[in-house]
């Protein structure tokens, strides 16, 4: 679970009912943290606040991305997904079949894995690693 709601309150972000429900959906329910598409965010938000529009969800997600409070994750031409874990270093595990994305925190420094001879003079400041495979649901359905 992220601390998105706390971060937004700390920034003094105007917390309308619609914004709050989008942030709550992104923050999760204490279960395993997954990255939702805008449509999935809308469906879950509408379950809590039936009058919320799709446009409001998209606008709120765009604003959260602009603020740097949510990361927009796009993989393999699939729908963008939204990650509220924007301030903690992590990598992603992606299901090649259904597209579900999970945060992972492997031990070690991924930047250290790139030898100086392979940096071609770059001053490397960030590393993005994506692990791919089948999630448990897709693996059992195969």
Image (tube, rainbow, N blue to C red):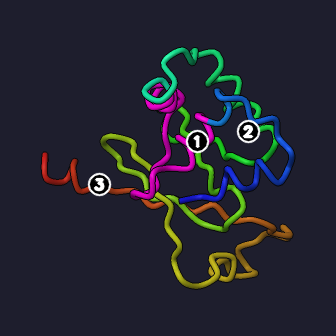
Which quadrant of the structure image shows residue 15?
top right
Which callout, 2 or 3, points to the residue nearer the camera?
2
Residue in front for this viewpoint, 104 or 6: 6
The question of residue 34 being in magenta is answered with yes
Q: Earlier in the sequence, mark 2 or mark 1?
A: 2
Which callout, 2 or 1, points to the residue nearer the camera?
2
Distance from the alpha carbon under mark 2 to that under mark 1: 10 Å
- For numbered disc 3, what is the local secondary structure? loop
Residue bearing the label numbered 2: 64
Distance from the alpha carbon under mark 3 to that under mark 1: 18 Å
Residue bearing the label numbered 1: 82
Question: What residue sits 50% from the left and 29% below the top?
Answer: 45
Q: Residues within 10 Å of mark 1 (few under 14, many from 20)?
A: many
Which callout, 3 or 1, points to the residue nearer the camera?
1
Q: Earlier in the sequence, mark 3 or mark 1?
A: 1
Residue bearing the label numbered 3: 135
Residue 98 seen in the current view:
yes
The question of residue 94 being in magenta is answered with no
Residue 133 place in picture, x, y as percent:
33, 56
């Amino acid at each position: 679970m992220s601390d998105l709601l706390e971060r937004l309150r700390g920034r003094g972000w105007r917390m309308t009912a619609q914004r709050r429900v989008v942030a709550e959906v992104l923050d999760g329910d204490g279960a395993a943290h997954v990255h939702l598409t805008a449509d999935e965010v809308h469906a879950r938000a509408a379950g809590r606040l039936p009058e919320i529009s799709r446009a409001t969800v998209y606008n709120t997600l765009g604003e959260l991305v602009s603020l740097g409070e949510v990361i927009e994750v796009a993989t393999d031409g699939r729908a963008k997904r939204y990650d509220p874990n924007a301030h903690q270093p992590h990598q992603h595990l992606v299901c090649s079949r259904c597209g579900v994305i999970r945060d992972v925190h492997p031990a070690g420094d991924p930047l250290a894995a790139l030898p100086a001879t392979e940096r071609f003079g770059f001053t490397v400041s960030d590393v993005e690693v994506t692990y791919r495979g089948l999630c448990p649901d897709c693996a059992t359905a195969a």
